[in-house]
Image (cartoon, rainbow, N blue to C red):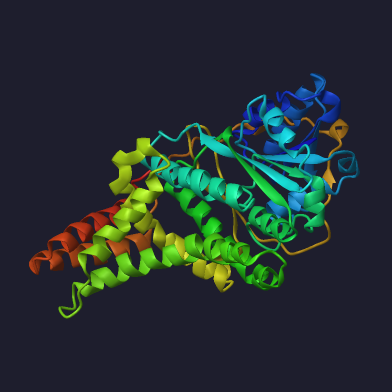
Amino acid sequence: MVTTIVATDILVYQQSIGAVCGLDWPRPNFLVQVLDDSDDAATSTLIKEEVEKWQREGVRILYRHRLIRDGYKAGNLKSAMNCSYVKDYEFVVIFDADFQPQPDFLKRTVPHFKGNEDVGLVQARWSFVNKDENLLTRLQNINLCFHFEVEQQVNGIFLNFFGFNGTAGVWRIKALEDSGGWMERTTVEDMDIAVRAHLKGWKFLFLNDVECQCELPESYEAYRKQQHRWHSGPMQLFRLCFVDIIKSKIGFWKKFNLIFLFFLLRKLILPFYSFTLFCIILPMTMFIPEAELPAWVVCYIPATMSLLNILPAPKSFPFIVPYLLFENTMSVTKFNAMVSGLFQLGSAHEWVVTKKSGRSSEGDLVVEKQPRQQRAGSASNLGSLAKEPSSSLRKDSQRKKHNRIYRKELALSFLLLTAAARSLISVQGIHFYFLLFQGVSFLVVGLDLIGEQVE
């Protein structure tokens, strides 16, 4: 068993490494790799020291820092899986830097491979330590509960397929190799490998009762960047694998599920529908007397969609109205990301590391694109580490948090509030209330008044 931690965040590395080193599994059959792709010397030094500490306690753990940081997370994983010692293991489990598995994680996941040679992936669900921290995290929790309990669990039961979440999952190494391994062609390497493995005939199991704790981004800036990647990357992948899906030997309904439900519905159709209808068409009809949208389009359809999404998280029912308004507001970011990925525009290949820090979000760290070079190398020799003075690891000064201004959201807020005023004058009651509250929602987001502020 190879356990891999993708470590990129200085504020959460200790808890993640500690949780993985505490997994209940026979030590001779257990190896931990800590993959650090950071370019900050202070961060690397601290992570190395943490790895050395666990080595002294008898844990078989290695630290790997790539010399050529090419291919983002996919390149990092590809480099680690190319190590000679990996051939001695049958499975690999991956954890992002903010994930904290329970000690019995492996004992509750690995046995599902026994007697099921066609199972390539066992995926655990996520649970969130900060889901009640603020309104933004509460709204994210609604979406992710639907994702796990409906999208992944239903697909896992009926189709033996769902998108790999990139973390908290156990892969059969043979399945990874048979599917072509990790590729750096998109910003959603997890979805990419899942689709290719599915087309090769590998089956997936989703365990809704096995949870792995992690954090939700607490600032809107962090969440917006994360959602951009999560909606741009799938459109990049769709362009690349559409022909492969059509030519594959899987059944018709599995192809339909991949093309329509997996790619198009949630990542393209719904953002396009929300953005064009509620942010453009509806407010514009207030200025055209001849145009009229029936109440069921404005009220009943979005209310039904929100109700269905919130059902897996019944404790979130008091937030159904903010959820509906926020999802329409986020449609601007999702629509822009979808267009960017589909047509390969400038921001399509931007990789963003979502910063996690317990109760203190710091926004996102944007990693610039680098020219494609040779296969990534790594440095894993712990004996040659140079000790840096502890004073160099301290921050020079405490930065103040501040609100950002989002111009697109503010522009749409002005349009919606103006349309609401026009609706009030023309006595269109239900349209007025919707436009008013939606306009206020855009205003709140545009002024960065939701969630924590960034540093």
Instruction: Give the image quarter of residue 411.
Output: bottom left
Work out whether 455 lies above or below 264. Answer: above
Residue 455 can be seen in this image: no
Nearer the observer, 215 or 267: 267
Residue at left 73%, top 64%? 371
**How many circles with numbers are drawn on the protein?**
0
Q: Is residue 426 left or right of residue 215?
A: left
Residue at left 80%, top 62%? 373
Nearer the observer, 244 or 427: 244
Residue at left 60%, top 36%? 98
**What percent of the width, then of the height, locates residue 39?**
70, 46
Nearer the observer, 194 or 281: 194
Nearer the observer, 281 or 352: 281
**What percent of the width, then of the height, locates residue 368?**
63, 58
Of all residues, the one furthest to the top in this rendering is 57
Residue 159 can be seen in this image: yes
Q: Is residue 3 left or right of residue 144?
A: right
**What percent of the width, then of the height, locates residue 432?**
16, 61
Residue at left 87%, top 45%? 83
